[in-house]
């Protein structure tokens, strides 16, 4: 038997899709399941964006595009970054990707060599550790502590920097905890990266999804021209998960290499999707604050409900659409509790350990659902405990 590569054995997937498969199997057995496992907005793509995508197809915009994206969308992203982050990147810095995940993968592929150290949050989005492991890098996890509202501490990063440190990955607003880092914390992390000549990748996919606070990007320090990388996309706040559209703002030298990465891996991002992205950024934005007002109501409802469950304790998240309750009072591990809720209560959630070892003692609930489902889930959980 021919063996696969060593890297193939190191890369790993996401528990969310594994739990979804289990939940769907239970549904096929005629069991009622309430879904809180998948991080996807519970609204449809806005109609103006859909119309733009259909129009692009009708206008025969269905062929290859430049690997780094069409000029029209890249110019619009220049405007978007200037408006939302306060600096205007050069056009050569802007790279379009088929979703944000390729941005994570390709930026790390461009930066990290085997034996390098990669610092990232734990609990955190699984792709960071998965790609670091695949590349043969040393995974250096910074614990996100409940007493610090699950924010990544610059002091903890400083303590973990060595001569082998090549990259720091930050994510704010954060998945899975919903934490939002402060401006001073982001500035300090960007300063650390500069002092130690380390790359800093900032995953900002939830940048427009905050409650009573503001998002701050560490890429402001060098306008993504030297060592910082901005990653963002359209999946979350434009409800375009299936359209697969993201973007990167990177230093010039990296952009040149990313062009070849994209050609080799995906050729290009779908043309009609990019034209829909232009409409997303330039069209009516009023639905975003309306959506976030609804998310805030759902957030408050689920946090109140989870805090009423014996053995549960839940902080109020400041961004994204995830609640991350402490379930240590139940006496169960994260996996045991998640399995219990799925099989006994018919409520699908994710164990905190799906996001790293420091997630033990917690669960993640995506509250991108209806208030009715939230209320029903809380009642089911209470009855099952």
Image (cartoon, rainbow, N blue to C red):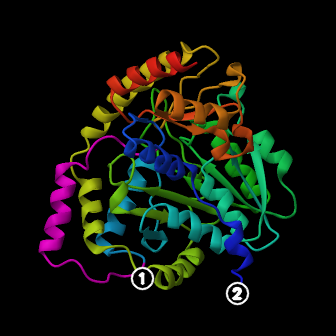
Q: Check the image and report above or below for 93 versus 339.
A: below
Q: Residue at x 73, y 57 (%)?
A: 194
Q: Which residue, given by chain and number where applicable, does mark 2 sit on?
A: 2
Q: Which mark is residue 110?
A: none
Say whether residue 42 is magenta.
yes
Say if residue 179 shows up in the picture: no
Q: Is residue 111 left or right of residue 75?
A: right
Q: Indicate the position of residue 372 as horizontal and vertical percent values.
A: 32, 23
Q: Check the image and report above or below for 248 versus 171.
A: below
Q: Where on the picture, by quarter, is residue 74?
A: bottom left
Q: Is residue 210 left or right of residue 138?
A: left
Q: Nearer the viewer, residue 154 or 325?
A: 325
Q: Residue at x 65, y 25 (%)?
A: 326
Q: Is residue 312 left or right of residue 379?
A: right
Q: Indicate the position of residue 232 as horizontal and vertical percent values.
A: 46, 56
Q: Is residue 98 left or right of residue 103?
A: left
Q: Which residue, given by chain and number where applicable, does mark 1 sit on?
A: 267
Q: Residue at x 40, y 45 (%)?
A: 40
Range drawn in magenta? 38-67
Which SS does the magenta portion mostly show? loop
Label 2 sits on a secondary structure element that is: loop
Q: Which quarter of the rendered picture does the C terminus lie within?
A: top right
Say whether residue 151 is magenta.
no
Q: Check the image and report above or below for 200 versus 305.
A: below
- The earlier-in-sequence mark between 2 and 1 is 2
Say if residue 140 shows up in the picture: yes
């Amino acid at each position: 038997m021919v063996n696969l590569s060593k890297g193939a054995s190191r890369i790993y997937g996401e528990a969310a899709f594994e739990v979804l498969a289990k939940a769907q199997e239970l549904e096929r057995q005629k069991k009622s399941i309430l879904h809180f496992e998948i991080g996807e907005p519970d609204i449809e793509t806005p109609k103006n964006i859909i119309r733009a995508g259909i129009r692009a197809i009708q206008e025969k915009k269905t062929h290859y595009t430049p690997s780094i994206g069409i000029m029209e969308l890249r110019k619009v992203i220049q405007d978007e970054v200037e408006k939302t982050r306060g600096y205007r990147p050069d056009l050569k810095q802007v790279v379009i990707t088929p979703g944000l995940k390729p941005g994570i993968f390709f930026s790390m592929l461009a930066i990290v060599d085997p034996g390098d150290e990669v610092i990232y949050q734990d609990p955190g989005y699984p792709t960071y550790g998965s790609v670091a492991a695949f590349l043969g890098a040393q995974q250096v996890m910074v614990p996100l502590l409940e007493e610090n509202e699950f924010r990544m501490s610059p002091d903890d990063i400083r303590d973990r920097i060595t001569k082998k440190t090549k990259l720091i990955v930050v994510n704010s607003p954060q998945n899975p905890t919903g934490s939002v880092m402060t401006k001073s914390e982001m500035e300090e992390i960007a300063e650390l990266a500069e002092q130690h000549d380390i790359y800093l990748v900032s995953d900002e996919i939830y940048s427009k999804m905050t409650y009573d606070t503001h998002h701050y990007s560490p890429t402001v320090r060098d306008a993504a021209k030297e060592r910082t990388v901005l990653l963002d996309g359209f999946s979350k706040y434009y409800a375009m998960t299936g359209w697969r559209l993201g973007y990167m703002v990177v230093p010039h030298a990296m952009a040149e290499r990313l062009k070849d990465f994209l050609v080799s891996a995906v050729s290009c991002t779908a043309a009609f999707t990019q034209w829909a992205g232009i409409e997303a950024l330039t069209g009516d934005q009023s639905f975003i604050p309306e959506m976030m007002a609804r998310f805030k109501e759902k957030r408050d409802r689920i946090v109140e409900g989870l805090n009423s469950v014996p053995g549960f304790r839940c902080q109020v998240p400041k961004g994204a659409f995830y609640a991350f309750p402490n379930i240590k009072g139940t006496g169960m591990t994260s996996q045991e509790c998640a399995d219990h809720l799925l099989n006994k209560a018919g409520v699908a959630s994710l164990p905190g350990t799906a996001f790293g070892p420091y997630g033990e003692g917690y669960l993640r609930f995506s509250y991108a659902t209806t208030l009715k489902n939230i209320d029903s889930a809380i009642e089911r959980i209470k009855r099952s405990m």
